[in-house]
Image (cartoon, helix red, strand yellow):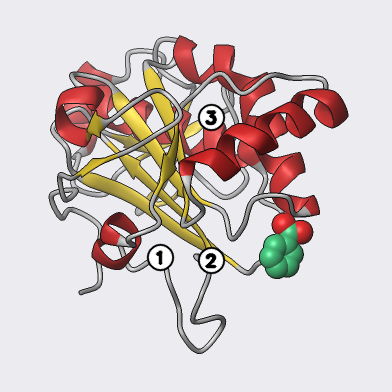
Amino acid sequence: MTIRLGDLAPDFEQDSTDGPIRFHEWAGDSWVVLFSHPKDFTPVCTTELGAVAKLKPEFEKRGVKVIGLSVDPLDSHRRWVGDIEETQGAALNFPLLADSDRKVSDRYGMIHPNANDTFTVRSVFVIDPSKKVRLTLTYPAATGRSFEELLRVIDSLQLTDKFGVATPADWSQGEDVIIVPAVTDEQAKVKFPNGWKTLKPYLRVTPQPGA
Ligand code: BEZ
C-alpha cells in the first residue's frame, strides 16, 4: 500500500543498532526522519550515513529524531559502522533498523521491484509529532540525497505549521514567505504587521515571521 501525505505513519517493532524499537513509542513527541538505504558496505550509502551523523545537531535543534533502515541484518550494520566512522569522520549516532524480514520496508513501500526486488530504494518519510506523514521522497540507488535539503523542508513545514504561511521556490531560513490566498488582506493586516508586497492578488510576500 502506498503511504501518502497526511496518512498516519504505520507503527512497527523492529531490531536496530540501538536495540529493539517500537516506532511510535520511540518517536514520542518529536518529528521523525525515517529513511532507507539500499545496502550496507556500499559507497553512496556510506557517505549518506556519515552526512546524517554530521547533521544530527541540526536535526536535534529542530526537534527531529532520525532513524535509518536497510534490509541487512544487525550483525552487518554493526560491522559496517566502523567503516562509516573511518571514512566519513563521523560515528553513527542514530539507530539503524535491521529490516531483514522486510516488515517495515514492505509496509512503507520502500522496495520498488522494478528498480530492484531485493534492496530498498532511497526513501525518506518526514513524520510530525502527531505521527502524520508530511513529506515523502524517493531517490534511486546511485544518487545520494541532500540532507541539507531535508533540513530546509523541515524548516518550511515547521514555519507553515506555526504561522500559516507558505514558502516559495528555493526558499531558505530568513527569506520572505508567502501569505496564503485563504488569508484576506484584512486578516493579513493583523497577522503580518510588518506589511507585505502584492505582486498579484494571489501572490503576496511578507518578511518571515519570527525571524
Ligand atoms: C551505493 O550505495 O553506492 C549503492 C547501493 C546500491 C546500488 C548502487 C549503489
Q: Helix, strand or loop at disc 3?
A: loop
Q: Give the structural element (helix, strand or loop) at label 1.
A: loop
What's the amino acid at mark 3?
Answer: Asp
At label 3, counting other C-alpha atoms closer than 10 Å, the crowd grade (few under 14, some 14-19, many 20 or more) is: some
Please report whichever mark, 3 or 2, sits nearer to the chain's N-terminal start.
2
Residue 110 circle label: 1
Instruction: Determine which of the numbered discs, if any, sits on residue 73 in the image.
Output: none
- Find residue 121 and name its label: 2
The dot on residue 176 is 3
Q: Nearer the viewer, mark 3 or mark 2?
A: 2
Q: Quadrant of the N terminus?
A: bottom left
Give the Cα distance between marks 1 and 2: 6 Å
- Using the rendered view, name the quadrant where residue 196 is placed: top left
Counting residues from the N terminus, which is met first, the one under dot 3 or under dot 1? 1
Q: Residue at x 46, y 13 (%)?
A: 60
Viewer-proximal residue among 105 and 211? 105
Closer to the eye: label 3 or 1: 1
Q: Is mark 3 within 8 Å of ligand 1?
A: no
Q: CA distance from mark 3 to mark 2?
A: 35 Å
Q: Specify whether residue 127 is in view.
A: yes
Residue found at x 69% / y 42%? 48
- Mark before the other along the chain sequence, 1 or 2: 1
Side (left or right) of 187 relative to 147: left
Residue found farthest to the front: 75
Q: CA distance from mark 3 to mark 1?
A: 35 Å
Mark 2: which amino acid? Val
